C-alpha cells in the first residue's frame, strides 16, 4: 500500500488567480504519477501521466511537475476559471496494475 | 470512440444481500479495473481484469468478485453486503497490460447504498 497525500484538502480562489497544489508519494520503487480532474456528476478525466524525474507537462492553463527523488508533484493552474472547479486527484504506482490515490484537492473558483 | 459506461447509476440494497454492478469498457481497451471510493477517501483498487482473468487484486475480501466477458465488459459482484460497502464504485479501462503508465478512462460510477 502506498501512502499518497494531497494538500490542501480544499481551496477557494478568485477567477483569474493562479493556484497550485501538492501530491506527495513514496519515492522508493516509483513508476508513474497520474493526475485526474473530477468534476461533479462526471467521471474522472486524466490530465497527466508522468514517469521521469524533472518531467513537466502542460495542457492549456494547467501544468504539472514531478520530483521522483523527493516524492512530490505539483499541479499548477494559471488564471483560474469557474470551469476549473473540480476535485483534482493524484495517484502513484510502482509499476503494478493498480494506482494508489490521494483523497484529492477540491478547488472552487469564485466568479 | 465509445467511453466507459456503468450501470446502474444508483442502487440501494439491504445488508446481507448481493449486488452486481456492470461496466462496458472504452473501445480498444481490454483491461478493466474496479475502484471503491468511500466517503472522504480516494478511490481504492479492488481488482483488475485482463483477457477475462483477474490480473491483480487489492485488499478486499473474497466476497468481492468479478468477471470479464469476451467483449471486455465487466461485472463486479459483492456478496453478503455490509454497511461499510456503501460507496461509489468506479470502473476504469486502460490499454492492454499497462504497467501504470497509461491513463485510466473512468465511467461515471455506481453509487451503492447499503441499509
Image (tube, rainbow, N blue to C red):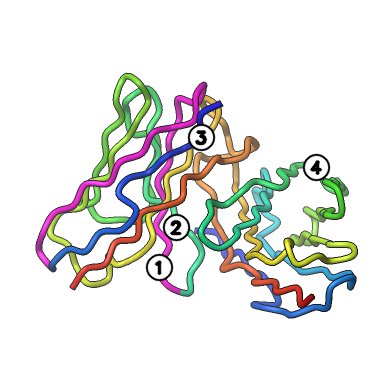
**Relative to B81, is B10 on the left or the right?**
right
The secondary element bearing badge 2 is classed as: strand
Task: Please give the residue where the numbered disc 1 appears in the rendered image.
Answer: B38
Task: Please give the residue where the numbered disc 2 appears in the rendered image.
Answer: B44
- Would you identify the image quadrant in which residue A88 lies? bottom right
Q: Quadrant of the C terminus of chain A?
A: bottom right
In the rendered structure, which segment of residues is drawn in magenta?
A: B15-39
- Residue B90 versus residue B101 in the image, above or below: below
For the residues beneath circles 1 and 2, the answer to whether they share a chain is: yes
- Would you identify the image quadrant in which residue A22 lies? bottom right
Task: Please give the residue where the numbered disc 3 appears in the rendered image.
Answer: B3
Report if the CB atoms under discs 1 and 2 are less than 8 Å apart. Answer: yes
Give residue B62's mark.
none
Label 4: few (<14), some or many (≥20) within 10 Å? Answer: some
Mark found first going from the N terminus, 1 or 2: 1
Which of the chains bears the disc numbered 3? B
Task: Please give the residue where the numbered disc 4 appears in the rendered image.
Answer: A52
Mark found first going from the N terminus, 1 or 3: 3
- Residue B3 versus residue A77 in the image, above or below: above
Amino acid at each position: 500500500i502506498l501512502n499518497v497525500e494531497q494538500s490542501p484538502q480544499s481551496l477557494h480562489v478568485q477567477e483569474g488567480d493562479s493556484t497550485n497544489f501538492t501530491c506527495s508519494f513514496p519515492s522508493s520503487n516509483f513508476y508513474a504519477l497520474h493526475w485526474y480532474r473530477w468534476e461533479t456528476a462526471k467521471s474522472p478525466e486524466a490530465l497527466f501521466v508522468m514517469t521521469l524525474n524533472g518531467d513537466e507537462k502542460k495542457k492549456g492553463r494547467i501544468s504539472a511537475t514531478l520530483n521522483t527523488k523527493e516524492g512530490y508533484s505539483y499541479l499548477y493552474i494559471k488564471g483560474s476559471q469557474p470551469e476549473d472547479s473540480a476535485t483534482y486527484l493524484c495517484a502513484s504506482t510502482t509499476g503494478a496494475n493498480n494506482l494508489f490515490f490521494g483523497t484529492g484537492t477540491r478547488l472552487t473558483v469564485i466568479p | 470512440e465509445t467511453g466507459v459506461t456503468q450501470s446502474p447509476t444508483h442502487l440501494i440494497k439491504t445488508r446481507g444481500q448481493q449486488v452486481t454492478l456492470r461496466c462496458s469498457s472504452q473501445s480498444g481497451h481490454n483491461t478493466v479495473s474496479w475502484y471503491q471510493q468511500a466517503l472522504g477517501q480516494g478511490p481504492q483498487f479492488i481488482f483488475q481484469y485482463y483477457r477475462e482473468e483477474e490480473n491483480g487484486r487489492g485488499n478486499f475480501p473474497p466476497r468481492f468478485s468479478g468477471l470479464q466477458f469476451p467483449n471486455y465488459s465487466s461485472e463486479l459482484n459483492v456478496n453478503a453486503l455490509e454497511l461499510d460497502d456503501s460507496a461509489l464504485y468506479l470502473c476504469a479501462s486502460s490499454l492492454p497490460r499497462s504497467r501504470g503508465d497509461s491513463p485510466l478512462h473512468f465511467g461515471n460510477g455506481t453509487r451503492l447504498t447499503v441499509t
